[in-house]
Image: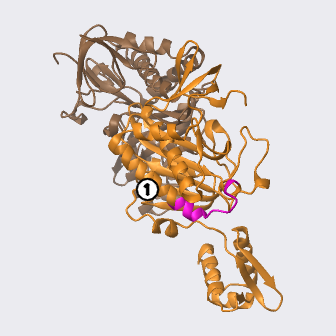
Chain colours: A orange, B brown
């Protein structure tokens, strides 16, 4: 028996027991494993976020189940969706993007979704780390195979951004904003980040992975204060916890809708939707590029998703850089 | 004992036996395996291209060893080379590019080289197949991690092309030409093809794989006549077979020299070297792009490796397409 199905059986015993108390001996007998093995599985469940009490002479008692993501429950809400045609859920992985890229290399179908409860090497842009504790947030990567030129594929970052914004609004009623190229903000603090990766030939895309990391229920004391940009979570801003499963289902549905529209109508609708979420348009910004800082009025996105900034000498088209509002 | 080292031991027995005849019983005893197992290994060696004669009552006799590629022998000529710091040789694989891309995803170092004797799913540009029989040709993929923007990485196709041209000239004295974007020709027929693949973020390259397929010793009767573009091999054009090992070593050395120059001086030197190998510059060409055919005078490459074509209405900058001389 796989250890995960041992745990499934233990959880089932809790559910089926009227008073909620299950003795170690009872579990041991039902599963046909030693008392030590039972204890190890209980510890593993606790690590997964289950709050399990042990009461002398009565047994184990399940106080609280975590908001776990399972492939079955995610798929349940996505009947006709291209996105989520295959869903892989990891308790822990290095990086959902890394997993999805390798799966893409080895022929996985468009719409594959990789989800992890926690990441040991969560990736941000430019080799930066993405803080990825377990039990609280959403880390998801989506494999796409659009027939576009490689330079067009960066448009898809903005598709992920719009999908996250719509989901945040739907789930919490809050109004997020976006920061070029790949951040989602709530009240000026980062609550989600995007990392799109691509495998391509010179003139053909093999596959694209939309990586989406959302700070959902991370409490304030888990958020580092020394970050490059101040961070928050949806729960902090909304004042209440949010279901990971519900958020994930909505997000995948939004990506599905937006991607179908993108394939049919191109990138302009999604780029315009992104621009509408950006409250820095028309304001003075600074962009740190590799060797210089460009200062000017942000005017929007061009059709490739490049940032357009009107400077004293003309309109700069910026492909890579870190943006900040002037004065902050 | 691994089957490959069983075969190594058999080959060593052949080498160490003065009259060249080794009996099945002797091999069986030395290896500690059954006569049937010996026979299977002899068959496997034959499939690898070894010509082994079986003479009743005398034993097996090695008549001819194929021109095999081994990691040890390849590395022997590449002491200070970044390229070839790690070399993986497959008797058979799906595609050396596919292997190198996955190895790149999982952290393999810059300079990794993947070589295969034959490919079961050799890749050409745009999902086309690359004919990859065993024993005669060279299929090699090189992993690089340049710190360039994704759109600059297509410059590296031209680096591979120049490396192949220099190696052909060095090994055979023949003068190859190039066809944009990724072919090497001898006497107007294709003798090598390049397929560069890349894993990238929007504004960062994770890794690039330079895929190089060279028709070295493929005989005329093994070359299909129904190809998109007429093909040949170096041996056909040179009139004599060429050492795969020697060619591979020279090629990796040329890539190493050119890549060091690229990192130091940028792409222009390599793009200019490519232009010098292109005998269509200044002539009328047609380029089939996705939805249209462009006709004009080829003027060269821009700094990203795009093809520049002067038409009646101006200079077109072509990122993707199939080129042919007008009139052919």
Residue B221 placed where, x, y %?
21, 34
Look at the image and give the residue range highlighted in magenta.
Answer: A237-249
Residue B167 placed where, x, y %?
43, 19
Residue B95 placed where, x, y %?
41, 42
Along the viewing direction, whichever of B321 and A214 lies nearer the viewer: A214
Q: Secondary structure at mark 1?
A: loop
Q: Please tell me in which quadrant of the rendered image residue A9 appears.
A: bottom right
Along the viewing direction, whichever of A104 and A293 lies nearer the viewer: A293
Q: Is residue A176 left or right of residue B11?
A: right
Which image quarter holds the N terminus of chain A? bottom right
Residue B296 placed where, x, y %?
25, 13
Q: Is residue A245 magenta?
A: yes
| Rendered view: A224 above or below B307 | below
Examine the rendering and report whether any part of residue A295 can be seen.
yes
- Residue beneath label 1, please? A83
Residue drawn at (35%, 34%), measured in percent from left and top? Answer: B125
Q: Is residue A265 left or right of residue A197?
A: left
In the rendered image, the residue lying farthest to the top is B282
Q: Tell how many labels.
A: 1
Which image quarter holds the C terminus of chain A? top right
Residue drawn at (52%, 59%), measured in percent from left and top? Answer: B29
Q: Is residue B60 left or right of residue A314?
A: left
């Amino acid at each position: 028996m796989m250890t995960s199905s041992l745990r499934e059986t233990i959880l089932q015993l809790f559910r089926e027991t009227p008073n909620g108390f299950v003795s170690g001996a009872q579990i041991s007998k039902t599963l046909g494993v030693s008392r030590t093995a039972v204890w190890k599985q209980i510890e593993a469940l606790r690590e997964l976020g289950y709050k399990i009490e042990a009461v002398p002479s009565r047994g184990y008692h399940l106080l609280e189940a975590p908001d776990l993501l399972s492939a079955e429950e995610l798929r349940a809400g996505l009947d006709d969706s291209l996105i989520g045609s295959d869903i892989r859920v990891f308790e822990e992985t290095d990086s959902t993007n890394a997993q999805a890229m390798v799966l893409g290399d080895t022929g996985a179908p468009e719409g594959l979704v990789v989800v992890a409860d926690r990441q040991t090497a969560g990736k941000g842009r430019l080799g930066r780390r993405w803080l990825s504790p377990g039990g609280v947030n959403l880390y998801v990567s989506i494999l796409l195979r659009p027939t576009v030129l490689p330079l067009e594929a960066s448009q898809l970052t903005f598709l992920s951004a719009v999908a996250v914004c719509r989901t945040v609004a739907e789930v919490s009623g809050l109004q997020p904003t976006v920061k070029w190229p790949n951040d989602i903000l709530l009240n000026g603090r980062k609550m989600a980040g995007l990392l799109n990766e691509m495998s391509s030939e010179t003139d053909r895309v093999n596959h694209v992975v939309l990586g989406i990391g959302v700070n959902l229920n991370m409490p304030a004391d888990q958020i580092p204060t020394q970050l490059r940009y101040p961070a928050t979570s949806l729960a902090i801003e909304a004042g209440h916890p949010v279901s990971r499963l519900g958020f994930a289902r909505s997000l995948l549905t939004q990506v599905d809708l937006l991607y179908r529209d993108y394939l049919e109508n191109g990138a302009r609708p999604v780029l315009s939707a992104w621009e509408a979420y950006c409250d820095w348009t028309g304001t003075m910004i600074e962009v740190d590029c590799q060797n210089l800082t460009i200062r000017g009025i942000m005017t929007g996105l061009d059709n490739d998703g490049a940032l357009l900034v009107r400077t004293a000498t003309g309109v700069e088209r910026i492909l890579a850089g870190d943006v900040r509002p002037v004065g902050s």
